[in-house]
Image (cartoon, rainbow, N blue to C red):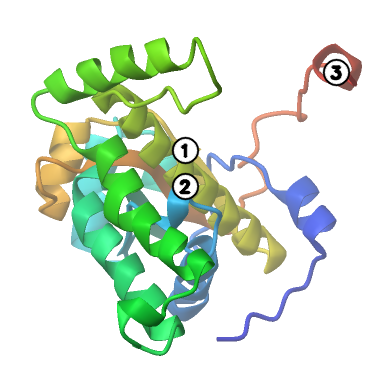
């Protein structure tokens, strides 16, 4: 997979804007797909990769998504749309994938021959990750939360173990992937607009997503119209948000 980057990372970050109106100009599906693949290389908690990427090119589905996105211009004029989905529900499957990958890296040898480091890595996915993710109607999560708070009185410990906490973890990773994707698009002079305004139930129905999935972000894609950016970029002064300790 090769993308001819026309911009450096710094240039792409500065070029990226939330474009509200796109030109009626087609963009290359394969290039967008390549950028999605770069998105999937983003950092992800425990390498769990609890995400899914839906690349929408069908005019019929684009029209349906426009309605579900409240008819906003960033959806109405998008030439393609990428929907990034958080999939916390796939944690068991992802755990198994990581275990199989590690075993292949270790040469598929008997577990009795594993080094201490190799055993630790496998036990991380066999014991620690399931302990954090396993829940039942939020009850186990609440129990783990209280238990870890007590342990935390005596030593540092991971405290975010409730169902809502793990949901946040999945969305943070999906958000990192979304940013990777948008910067990759900017690097090849393609534009994007991440949209928060949408009817999530309608979107899931249109894309036939499982009820356990959650929409992280809907991103309109295209080439910016001359009126596609609604104003100069505004940022809070850096000295108000930067803290050196």
Q: Earlier in the sequence, mark 3 or mark 1?
A: 1
Q: Residues within 10 Å of mark 3 (few under 14, many from 20)?
A: few
The label nearer to you, 1 versus 2, is 2
Residue 128: which quarter of the image? Answer: top left
- In the visual, does 151 lie left or right of 138? right
Label annotation for residue 45: 2
In three-dimensional space, the C-alpha distance between marks 3 and 1, rounded to whole angstroms, equals 22 Å
Q: Which residue is mark 3?
A: 243
Q: Nearer the viewer, residue 207 or 70?
A: 207
SS for tag 1?
helix
- In the visual, does 202 lie left or right of 113? left
- Residue in the picture at 45% in, 83% down: 105
Quadrant where the image shows the N terminus: bottom right
Q: Position of residue 171 (x, y in %)?
A: 39, 38
Residue 137: which quarter of the image? Answer: top left
Label annotation for residue 172: 1
| Rendered view: 60 above or below 174 | below
- Residue in the picture at 47% in, 65% down: 36
Q: Position of residue 240 (x, y in %)?
A: 85, 12
SS for tag 2?
helix
Quadrant where the image shows the C terminus: top right
Q: Residues within 10 Å of mark 2 (few under 14, many from 20)?
A: few
Label annotation for residue 125: none
| Rendered view: 46 above or below 187 | above
Residue projecting furthest to the front: 112
In three-dimensional space, the C-alpha distance between marks 3 and 2, rounded to whole angstroms, equals 25 Å
Q: Earlier in the sequence, mark 1 or mark 2?
A: 2
SS for tag 3?
loop
Q: Position of residue 47 (x, y in %)?
A: 45, 57
């Amino acid at each position: 997979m090769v993308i001819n980057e026309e911009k450096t990372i710094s240039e792409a970050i500065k070029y990226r804007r939330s474009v509200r109106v796109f030109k009626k100009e087609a963009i290359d599906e394969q290039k967008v797909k390549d950028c999605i693949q770069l998105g999937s290389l983003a950092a992800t908690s425990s390498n769990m990769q609890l995400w899914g990427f839906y690349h929408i090119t069908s005019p019929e589905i684009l029209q349906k998504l426009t309605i579900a996105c409240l008819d906003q211009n960033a959806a109405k004029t998008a030439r393609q749309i990428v929907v990034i989905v958080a999939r916390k529900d796939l944690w068991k499957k992802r755990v198994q994938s990581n275990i199989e990958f590690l075993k292949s890296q270790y040469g598929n040898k008997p577990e009795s021959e594993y080094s201490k480091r190799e055993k630790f890595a496998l036990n991380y996915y066999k014991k620690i990750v399931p302990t954090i993710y396993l829940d039942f109607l939020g009850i186990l999560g609440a129990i783990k939360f209280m238990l870890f708070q007590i342990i935390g009185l005596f030593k540092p410990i991971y405290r975010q173990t409730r169902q809502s906490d793990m949901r946040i973890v999945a969305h943070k990773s999906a958000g990192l992937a979304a940013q990777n994707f948008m910067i990759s698009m900017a690097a090849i002079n393609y534009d994007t607009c991440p949209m928060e305004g949408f009817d999530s139930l309608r979107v899931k129905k249109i894309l036939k997503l499982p009820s356990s999935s959650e929409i992280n972000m809907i991103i309109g894609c295209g080439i910016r119209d001359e009126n596609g950016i609604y104003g100069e970029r505004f940022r809070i002064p850096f000295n108000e948000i930067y803290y050196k300790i």
